[in-house]
Every structure is written in C-alpha cells, then in structure tokens.
Amino acid sequence: EDQVTQSPEALRLQEGESSSLNCSYTVSGLRGLFWYRQDPGKGPEFLFTLYSAGEEKEKERLKATLTKKESFLHITAPKPEDSATYLCAVQGSYNFNKFYFGSGTKLNVKP
Amino acid sequence: NAGVMQNPRHLVRRRGQEARLRCSPMKGHSHVYWYRQLPEEGLKFMVYLQKENIIDESGMPKERFSAEFPKEGPSILRIQQVVRGDSAAYFCASSPQSGLRTDTQYFGPGTRLTVL
C-alpha cells in the first residue's frame, strides 16, 4: 500500500536557524507529491506540488525538492510565523483517487 | 474568489444522534474529497465524489457513514448514530477536473465534531 513517513515528528528552531523536513514515500508510480502547511484549528494550506524526481519549487523561505524516494522541505532563515505543522501527501498513478498523508512535522520557531 | 467552504465549523452531538457536514467546493471545481483527522495524526482519506457520483469510498466505514454530492448544492457527509469515536476534525477538499496536471486539492477549514 502507498505510504508516507515524515520526520522529525517535531522540530524546534531558533529564528534564522535553517533546517530541512523529510518526507519518505512508497507509491506505485508517483503522480504527484504535495506539501501543505496546517495551523492549529485550521485546514491544510497548499504550498507545493512536485511531479518528478529532480524537480524543485520555491516560495519565500521555503524550498521543496523531490527524489525517487523522498522529498525535502528546506526552510531558510525561518521566522516565528513559520511555526506550523507541515504535511506531505502523495498521489499514486495507479490509484489516483486518494492522497496518502504523512503524520506531519510540527515546527516551532522561537524568536 | 471564495475557497472551499464547510459548515458548521463546530458540531456537538450526543451519542446516537445524526451529524450532517456540508462542503461547497471552490468555484470551477467538480471533485470533492472528504478526510478525517484525529488529534496529532495525519489526514485519512474517506471518500471521493464527483457530481452525482461516488467514485471511491474505500476509506469510509461501511456502516453509519454516507456521502453525496448532488447536482445542485453542497456535498454532504452524513454520520448516523454517532459514537464517541467519531469525534474528530472532518475536512473537505476540492480539485479541478482530474486527468490534467492539476490534481492539487484545496482544503476547507474543517468541521470539528464532538460527540458527548
């Protein structure tokens, strides 16, 4: 079955301290890998879609990369407002009706 | 340019009652997905619908749960005879027509169901 594992479960950073979040996946043919940000009590907010190995996408302090086995969300010089839970999801080519979500990485950026 | 809308945002039910959750997709989107999220967990797929059709309900419990997306009006997730274990956040997402490279799902704010 398609599966997504995110690490670490929780990450504490000082403001300005860059780091990366990992999303490892197993899927029968990747149709798309998606990153979302979720704030407490709110719905997931779309960040990026990646379709093939080697692809990269950037938005402000965030950069998402993709290999055949995993994706990284790099956070450069984070600010306290970047604190949230970051969710990764995959969509397979053979059963693209559903997204498989990881449990998320809870990021806390301290000023 | 409204996003995905869900109501109610919070719903409290006693055991044995029925819960109805509504979702209006983004304008121009014809695909609707329902997910359930327990505290500190990821989202679990429940059902995928298009107008008047259930495409995939493999994630939905066989009993007490049903979903519809009528020709007119919002999609509805219905939970009959709720139990305490149904307490969770239920999220709806929508996407444009599938088959294109635009399968990204956009989520609503969720309905938080509490069963007393």
Image (tube, coloured by chain):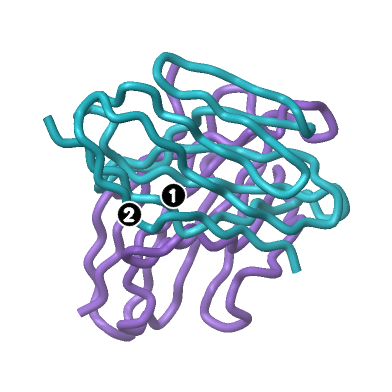
Chain colours: A cyan, B purple
Q: Is residue B20 above or below residue B72?
A: below
> What subunit carries mark 2?
A
Q: Is residue B74 left or right of residue B52?
A: left
Check residue B44 in the rendering and tell me which mark sits there, or answer none: none
Quadrant holding the C terminus of chain A: top left
Circle 1 chain: B
**Residue at 42% across / 61% down in the picture?**
B37
Tell me which corner region of the image, top left, top right, bottom left or bottom right, holds residue B27.
top right
Under mark 2, the amino acid is Ala
Which residue in the structure is indicated by mark 1? Answer: B22
> What residue sits 79% from the left and 32% below the top?
A52
The residue drawn where x is 70% and y is 69% is B58
Q: Are marks 1 and 2 in contact (CB under 8 Å)?
A: no
Q: Mark 1 against mark 2, which lies toward the viewer?
A: 2
The spot of residue A22 in percent (x, y) is: 53, 47
Q: Which residue is mark 2?
A: A10
Determine whether, in the image, residue B34 is placed left or right of residue A111.
right
Labels in figure, total: 2
- CA separation, marks 1 and 2? 32 Å
Name the residue nearer the viewer: B56 or B65: B56
Quadrant location of the N terminus of chain A? bottom right
Please, is residue A56 above or below residue A71 in the view? above
Please provide percent x and percent y for residue B100: 82, 27
Q: Is residue B92 above or below residue B103?
A: below
Residue at 72% over, 27% down? B102
Figure check: A53 above or below B75? above
Tell which of B85 and A111 is nearer to you.
Answer: A111
Secondary element under disc 1, as helix, strand or loop, is strand
